[in-house]
Image (cartoon, rainbow, N blue to C red):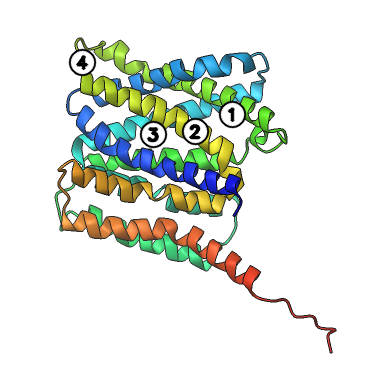
Amino acid sequence: MTSMNRKSYYLIFLIPVIWGLGFPITYNAVSQVDAGIYAFFRSFIALLFITPFAIKYLLKVDKKLILASLAFGLLIALQFVGQSNALRFLPSSATAFIISTNAIILIIFTSVLYKKKPEKIDVFSISLGVVGAIIILNPKFQQFNIGYWWAGLSSLAIALSILLIGYLSFFKDSSEPSAKVGDGLRFIFFQSLFCVFFLSYYPLSLGIPNNLPMQVWLSILYMGVIATVITTVLQIKFQNRIGNVRASLIYNLDVIFASVFGYLNHETMTATQLVGGSIIFLASIAHPVYLLAMRKYKTSTPSIDKHHS
């Protein structure tokens, strides 16, 4: 492994750590401020932070970029609101487990949209995810609350975001690194702009609260700058160097970090949440683990020359 690839792995590995820490940070913050207001300020801070870096790339804008940013702005708004509201009712670990079902939702959507029969590993992942969801959501095991619906909304928004990004040619066609960074910054800027627009419903309807605690502002800064902008830039810059499959497997580790940080935050978690969530986590990583294993098997198996005597 080259030093550049090693650096890419280290930086990509930071992403699930950052995301995982964001769960208990948000969990503490939304106990002191409305979740919608929190989501608005998170997106607004992200927009303020990205603007100085993106402004020199904003002269080159096309209709496709605006429409894509509009769609993603809506999905990111739903993701932020879903996660923030879920953490009002659920601990960090349970919220992260439910949101990780986006990998399973993505498999289902991909099979339906492309009219392609799912592979056996995909059927296994979906089945395992359903089992985990039944264990978590079954009211016979524990009291069901609206937090699961909010987490499900966030998971759905993430799955749709991943699905739609496959149609964005400006992430595929740019061979020059500088052009790719410029396209990425333009996209983040307009996505954040539209996200702020959609989430402005909350301050307009509820008003902007006075004298928010410093802890809430620090949480907003962390989620807006580090967990949103910095991680997105890291994805754009380094993900292609390690591959999408490895990256997706690394990203799913945010569930583990959310559980660890949630435990350190003295959050409670039921046995059914732990068991069901662990099964969902296994379902979410089954496909990338399978792909990596098959790739390693193919590269390690020597080819047989049929004409060799």
Identity of the amino acid at label 1?
Gly
Residue 62 in percent (x, y) is at 67, 20
Mark number for residue 232?
2
Left/right placement of residue 266 relative to residue 61 reads left
How many other residues sit within 10 Å of disc 3, few (<14), some (14-19) or many (≥20)?
many
Of tags 3 and 1, the one toward the viewer is 1
Figure quadrant of the N terminus? bottom right
Circle 2/circle 3 CB separation < 8 Å: no
Circle 1/circle 2 CB separation < 8 Å: yes
How many other residues sit within 10 Å of disc 4, few (<14), some (14-19) or many (≥20)?
few
Q: Between marks 3 and 4, how big is the CA–CA gap?
A: 23 Å
Which residue is depicted at the point 18% across and 40% down? 265
Ranked by sequence position, the earlier of labels 1 and 2 is: 1
Ranked by sequence position, the earlier of labels 2 and 3 is: 3
| Residue 159 in view, yes or no | yes
Q: Which residue is mark 3?
A: 79
Of tags 3 and 4, the one toward the viewer is 4
Q: Which residue is mark 4?
A: 212
Identity of the amino acid at label 3?
Gln
